[in-house]
Image (cartoon, helix red, strand yellow):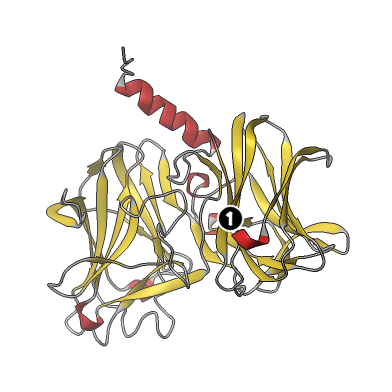
Amino acid sequence: MKLKVPAIVVYSIVLLLSQIGLVAIAHAQSYGASLGTDGLANTRLGPSGCMVSYRFLAKHSGVLQVIRIYLIPDHIGYAAGTGGTINVTLHTDDGTSSHHPASTVLGTHVISNILSLPSPSRYFYLVKFSSPVTVTAGHLYHLVFKNVDNNPTVNYLSVDDLYHAVPTSPNQPTISDTNLAVLLSGEGGTWKERPGYTPIYELDFTNGTSEGIGYMEGWVGAPRIISGVSAVRETFTVASDVKVSTAAIRVSRIRGTDPLVVRLENANGTLVHQGTIPAADIPVNNATSPAWTKLAYGTSYTLLAGQTYHLVFEASSTSLYETFPIRKGYAYGFKATTYFPYGHAEFNQNGTWVGWTQWGVTNRTDGDLQFYFNTP
């Protein structure tokens, strides 16, 4: 006999999990950053009639207040002229196996005169529809951008997304490409998924809930080595009890055949679990094209609310690995539900653990390793 769980109970569970980070950024059964990216890339709206769709699976039901997106309207290559006039429309999904935007439009917004906006409003733009729009949890939607300027080859804008130099399938390790993708179309052409691109967006609801992808770039230009005394870790404090059974990291093996050592430890350094990932499981590549790799614990560990833990990655001095963090967008308005809010990436510098160095700033705490735990 199957037990039927009322929909309101399921919805309440989803809300609870979102508060403790398990589905905070649309990831099923994972805890952590759960995203991989090498940097930021743009797609122009206008030249060649190019249109873009952000396809996403809604995790909450309710009326949308605004949608936050990432634009760079005043840099050569990203935009030109006035920035154009961009029609932004929210569509339902067509329900086919291709999952393209349907003709049904739920809401419209026009981006114009964007260069008149101050910073950071011009970059982290808020789309507000002309009339209220309601979305339903578990349904696919498309946020479509089209340049309707009279001269789109001169006046155009770009949307900016997370970018993989070497696309993987699926694009993100814990999210299906159906549920999260960037689609591209020429004027009147067929929509196609753009491999390696992940939309940066945030849905804000009138009831105060939010969801989306609030990581804004990968620090591929600032890798740190894992070799000998040099190590990296994610340090984090658990908000609510969570069980973990597998640890994953996106890492590059530069040389050597020694395994990658993975330690889960308490804040005082006492060991929870230690294991190794064979070097053969991590292809030799360069620092700009890391790969996801996993260590299965063989059992589950419960991380306790209020406790701080470290997920540490080490290797023998005769082998060399590298990795780098991804940057959380909280300084630009992205909410904690769109990234992993409970920790940050560190590296071992002369025997001391410090936050990352990037863009001339030392000891940064706004980056996470590209990591996650599976939660049974």
Quarter holding residue 268: top right
Q: Is residue 188 left or right of residue 215?
A: left
x, y (%) of residue 305?
Answer: 66, 30
Q: Residues within 10 Å of mark 1 (few under 14, many from 20)?
A: some
- Residue 166: % across, % down: 46, 71
Residue 108's x, y, as percent?
20, 57
- Asked if 101 appears above or below 4 in the picture, the reply is below
Q: Quadrant of the N terminus?
A: top left
Q: Observer-nearest residue: 111 or 282?
A: 282
Q: State whether residue 329 appears in this view.
A: yes
Determine the residue positioned at 55% across, 63% down.
291
Q: Is residue 240 visible?
A: no
The three-letter amino acid code for the residue at tag 1 is Thr
Asked whether 309 or 8 is in front, the reply is: 309
Q: Which residue is mark 1?
A: 293
Quarter residue 87 falls in: bottom left
Q: Is residue 298 left or right of residue 352?
A: left
* Residue name at image x 56 percent, y 47 percent: 340
- Tag 1's secondary structure? strand
Q: Give the residue at the far top of this rendering.
A: 1
Which of the 4 quarters of the picture holds residue 299?
A: top right
Q: Residue at x 43, y 63 (%)?
A: 168
Q: Can you give x and y, in whole percent of width and height, for residue 96 in the image?
A: 16, 51
Identified at 27% across, 87% down, the residue is 154
The correct choice, above or below, for 248 with respect to 308 in the image is below
Q: In the picture provided, is 177 more to the left or to the right than 289?
A: left
